[in-house]
Image (spheres, rainbow, N blue to C red):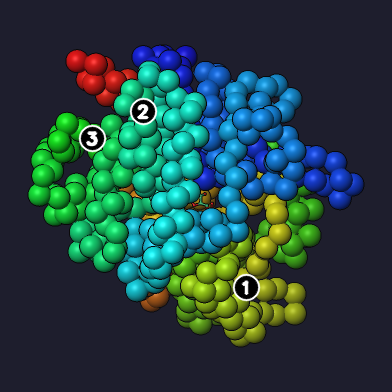
C-alpha cells in the first residue's frame, strides 16, 4: 500500500521513541500482561511497522519488560501475532531523572513552548541526556543497515541522529519534532543550543507540525552557525557535506477508528456512564481532555468558565464542564504548581455555583475506556481546547472525528498548531483573555443549529483529509525523495 510503497526505496524501517508500543507488566496475580497505548503516535505507527516487519527501539519501562526479551533485549510484537521486533533500552533511576525529567522536560519542553522562565537547566541532566541519546544511538546503529530508514520521534532524541551518523553513514535519518520550535530569541536561552541544533542537523529530513516551526528552526540555525547555508524558500540547510530538509507535516488522528468508537457508545452506555460520573445525561455538556500540563491552559479555561457562570447565572444547572485529566511528569515542581492551581479553581467554582443536584465542573482522573472517552466527545456540545502553546493538539481533532451526530462546537486556542488547519471553522479563543473566552463560551452554547452544522461539516472534512495515515504517507514519500536525492 501507499506507505509501504513510499518506504520501499529503503530496505527496512527503524522507529525510535521514548514510549514503547507494547509494555509488559505483572498484574495482581503475578501474570504478565501487555499494555498497549490507545491513541496517539505509537498506536498510529504500530500497524505500519507491522506491515514492513521493522524494528522499534524504545525505553523498556514495564516491570515485566526484562523477563520478555531475548539476549539482545528484543521481543517480537504484537504478542498475539508477532510481526516486528521491539528492542528495549534500559534506563536506571539516574538516567530517567536526568534524561526524561531533566533535560527533556525541564529544558526542551518549556523552551520549545516559549516558556523560558519555566526552564531549569542542570549540567548533570544534560550529561545524562547525552548518555541516554548515545545508548539509543548504539542500539540503532547495531540494528540499521546501509539502506535503512531511521525515524526518530520527538524531543527526547535531539542528539541521537548525530551519534548514529558518526557510527553509520548509510541509513537515511529523519525526525519528527512533535512540539513547537521557538524563535531564536527564545531558543538562544538554551545553554547547549549549538549541540542540540547540530544533533538535529544530522537528520536528512526534520519535520514539524506547521510551517512556522520550520521557519523558527531555520532562523535558529542561521543565527547560531556561521558555516550553515540556510535556504528559506526550499527549507534546506547545507552545512559542510550535510544537507537537511526541513518540512511541515501536520499530524492527524485515526479518523475511522474514532468514528467507530464514538458510534459504538450506545445511548444506554452513555446514560450509565453519565450516572457513574454524576452528571445529567441531557445537560448541555462541555468537555476538556488534557494531560495535566502547564501548557494546556487549564487554569485559563477554568477562569473563563467561572466568568461565564458569573455573567450568565441562567446557565447554572444547565451547563456542565467535564474535565478529564491525566497526571503527568508530576515530579517536576512546575507540574505540581499547575495541579494545585487546577484543584483550587475547581473547588472554588463548584463552591460558588453548585446547586443541590448539579456541579458546574466534574473532574475525572481515572482511566476511561475508549467507548467512554469517545462517547463523551460525541455527546459534548462544546469542547474547550485552550492551550497557551501546543505543537498541534490532537484532542481538537479527536473531538471533531467523534462528532458523528448532533454537531457540537469546537473552541480552539489560537496558540495551538491545530489552529492553522481548523481555525477558520472553530471558534478561536485567546486563552489569557478571560472576558472574551467567557463570551465565546456563551456564543458556542447558544449557536444556532445551521451554523453548528456548517462549521462541523467543514471541520470534519479538514480532519478527514489529513488523518494519521495520510500524515505518515506524506512523510514516507518525502523520505523516499530524500533518499533518491542522496543517491544522486
Ligand atoms: O506532545 C508531545 C508528547 O511527547 C506526545 O507525543 C506524548 O503523547 C506526550 O508528550 C506524552 O508525554 P510523556 O511521554 O512525557 O508522558
Which label sits in the foreground, 2 or 1? Answer: 2
Q: Earlier in the sequence, mark 2 or mark 1?
A: 2
Q: Say which residue appears at 74% left-offset and 57% top-offset.
A: 274
* Pick the front one: 45 or 197: 197
Question: Does residue 269 appear anywhere in the picture?
Answer: yes
Q: Say which residue appears at 44% left-offset and 62% top-offset.
A: 125
Q: Earlier in the sequence, mark 3 or mark 2?
A: 2
Q: Which residue is mark 3?
A: 244
* Pick the front one: 97 or 488: 97
Q: Which residue is mark 1?
A: 360
Q: Say which residue appears at 27% left-offset and 24% top-offset.
A: 482
Asked whether the beta carbons under mark 3 and mark 2 sit within 8 Å of each other, the answer is: no
Q: Is residue 116 above or below residue 382?
A: below
Q: Secondary structure at mark 2?
A: loop
Disc 3: CA contacts within 10 A as few (<14), some (14-19) or many (>=20): many
How far separated are the C-alphas under marks 3 and 2?
A: 17 Å
Asked whether the beta carbons under mark 2 and mark 1 sit within 8 Å of each other, the answer is: no
Which label sits in the foreground, 3 or 2? Answer: 2
Amino acid at each position: 500500500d501507499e506507505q509501504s510503497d513510499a518506504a520501499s526505496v529503503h530496505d527496512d524501517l527503524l522507529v525510535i521513541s521514548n514510549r514503547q508500543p507494547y509494555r509488559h507488566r505483572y498484574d495482581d496475580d503475578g501474570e504478565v500482561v501487555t499494555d498497549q497505548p490507545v491513541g496517539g503516535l505509537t498506536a498510529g505507527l504500530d500497524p505500519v511497522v507491522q506491515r514492513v516487519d521493522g524494528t522499534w527501539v524504545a525505553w523498556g519501562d514495564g516491570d515485566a519488560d526484562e523477563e520478555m526479551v531475548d539476549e539482545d533485549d528484543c521481543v517480537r510484537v504484537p504478542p498475539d501475532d508477532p510481526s516486528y521486533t521491539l528492542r528495549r533500552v534500559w534506563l536506571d533511576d539516574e538516567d530517567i531523572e536526568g534524561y526524561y525529567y531533566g533535560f527533556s522536560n525541564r529544558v526542551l519542553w518549556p523552551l520549545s513552548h516559549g516558556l523560558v522562565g519555566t526552564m531549569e537547566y542542570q549540567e548533570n541532566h544534560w550529561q545524562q541526556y547525552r548518555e541516554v541519546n548515545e545508548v539509543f544511538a548504539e542500539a540503532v546503529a547495531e540494528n540499521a543497515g546501509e539502506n535503512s530508514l531511521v525515524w526518530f520521534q520527538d524531543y527526547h532524541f535531539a542528539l541521537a541522529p548525530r551519534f548514529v551518523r558518526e557510527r553509520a553513514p548509510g541509513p537515511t535519518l529523519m525526525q519528527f519534532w512533535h512540539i513547537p520550535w521557538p524563535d531564536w530569541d527564545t531558543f538562544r536561552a538554551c545553554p547547549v543550543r549549538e549541540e542540540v541544533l547540530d544533533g538535529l542537523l544530522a537528520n536528512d529530513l526534520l519535520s514539524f507540525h506547521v510551517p512556522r516551526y520550520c521557519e523558527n528552526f531555520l532562523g535558529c540555525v542561521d543565527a547560531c552557525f556561521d558555516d550553515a547555508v540556510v535556504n528559506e524558500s526550499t527549507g534546506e540547510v547545507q552545512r559542510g557535506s550535510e544537507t537537511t530538509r526541513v518540512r511541515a507535516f501536520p499530524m492527524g488522528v485515526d479518523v475511522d477508528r474514532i468514528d467507530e468508537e464514538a458510534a459504538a457508545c450506545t445511548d444506554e452506555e452513555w446514560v450509565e456512564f453519565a450516572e457513574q460520573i454524576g452528571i445529567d445525561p441531557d445537560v448541555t455538556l462541555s468537555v476538556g481532555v488534557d494531560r495535566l500540563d502547564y501548557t494546556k491552559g487549564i487554569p485559563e479555561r477554568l477562569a473563563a468558565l467561572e466568568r461565564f457562570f458569573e455573567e450568565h447565572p441562567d446557565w447554572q444547572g444547565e451547563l456542565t464542564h467535564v474535565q478529564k485529566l491525566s497526571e503527568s511528569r508530576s515530579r517536576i515542581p512546575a507540574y505540581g504548581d499547575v495541579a494545585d492551581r487546577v484543584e483550587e479553581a475547581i473547588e472554588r467554582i463548584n463552591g460558588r455555583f453548585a446547586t443541590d443536584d448539579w456541579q458546574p465542573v466534574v473532574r475525572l482522573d481515572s482511566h476511561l475506556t475508549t467507548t467512554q472517552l469517545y462517547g463523551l466527545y460525541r455527546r459534548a456540545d462544546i469542547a474547550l481546547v485552550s492551550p497557551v502553546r501546543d505543537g498541534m493538539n490532537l484532542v481538537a481533532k479527536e473531538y471533531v472525528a467523534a462528532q458523528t451526530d448532533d454537531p457540537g462546537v469546537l473552541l480552539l486556542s489560537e496558540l495551538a498548531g491545530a489552529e492553522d488547519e481548523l481555525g477558520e471553522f472553530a471558534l478561536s479563543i485567546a486563552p489569557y483573555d478571560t472576558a472574551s473566552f467567557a463570551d465565546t463560551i456563551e456564543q458556542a452554547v447558544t449557536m444556532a443549529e445551521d451554523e453548528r452544522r456548517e462549521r462541523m461539516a467543514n471541520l470534519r472534512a479538514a480532519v478527514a483529509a489529513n488523518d494519521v495515515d495520510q500524515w505518515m504517507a506524506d512523510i514516507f514519500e518525502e523520505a523516499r525523495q530524500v533518499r533518491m536525492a542522496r543517491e544522486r
